[in-house]
Image (cartoon, rainbow, N blue to C red):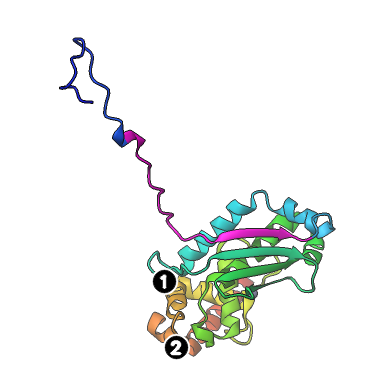
Amino acid sequence: MTATSTALPPGVTPAPEQTSSSAPIPPSKPEWPMPKLLFVVEDMACPGGIRVFQALDNPASFLQTCIINIYKLLYTKKSVPTNIRSITFTFRSMDGVAYTTGSRLDNDHKEIHFSTNYISNIDASRLSHEVQGVLLHELVHCFQQDGKGKCPGGLIEGIADWVRLKGGFAPPHWKRAPPSKWDDGYERTAFFLEWIEQSYGATVIRKLNECMCEEYEDELWKTLTGHSIDSLWKKYLHEYDAKATKDAE
Ligand SMILES: [Zn+2]
């Protein structure tokens, strides 16, 4: 009905047409792809199972925040992978700390297994920090590139701990003292990556990860920093020694 077809009393304005306000609003597209997250605690009543819920106030919010932070450190919105469809977090009794794997069906569904035995033995004062730090490390493995299998294992673990370090989840036992090799892995390589980032720009590690979508070769370091990996490692050791000497004076 329109205003021209019906006589209205003076001063009364016609009601607006209803078509636009009743039209469904399309859902806004999420800024970053978010896989479905599944959370399984196999034995809620075991000491480690009880502590899972003490360590994580709001697991969904924490894990989604971690995933977005990983995207921001390792990708741009153009390069971010969209194939990961789900991640299942399983807390169960097992040896070791945690590991990540593709599901038995396909690699687009990831599984993170976390030991409740390990969780039951974490010092109470560090419970949340440690559980969250391990989850962040394992989540990196769900999304990082590996140069189609050519990336050194120590660099894979180093990148995961570099993200953990940047997230503020470095445990107190991590030491900056350099190891014998640059790709010794874990926090030992993570501190080296942090130094590279501080020396050669905030996007170097992100670009390295993006290049590893296709391949890995040591030559990548030269392309990204202007220096070979051996030269970077020597510079790092030299700067570390110089600082240690200065600090001791
Ligand atoms: Zn790892």
Residue 214 visible in image: yes
Asked whether residue 246 is in view, the answer is no
| Residue 26 drawn above or below residue 192 | above
Q: Considering depth in this image, is 28 or 113 the residue closer to the camera?
A: 28
Residue type, label 1: Gly
Inspect the magenta stretch and tell me whether residue 40 lies in it. Answer: yes
Q: Which residue is mark 1?
A: 201
Residue 78, above or below 189: above
What secondary structure is the magenta-colored segment mainly? Answer: loop
Q: Is residue 186 magenta?
A: no
Q: Position of residue 33 (x, y in %)?
A: 47, 61
- In this view, the residue in front, 2 or 173, is 2
In the rendered structure, which segment of residues is drawn in magenta? 21-42
- Residue 195 lies, in percent from the top left, at 51, 74
| Disc 1: CA contacts within 10 A as few (<14), some (14-19) or many (>=20) | few
- Where does label 2 land, which residue? 228
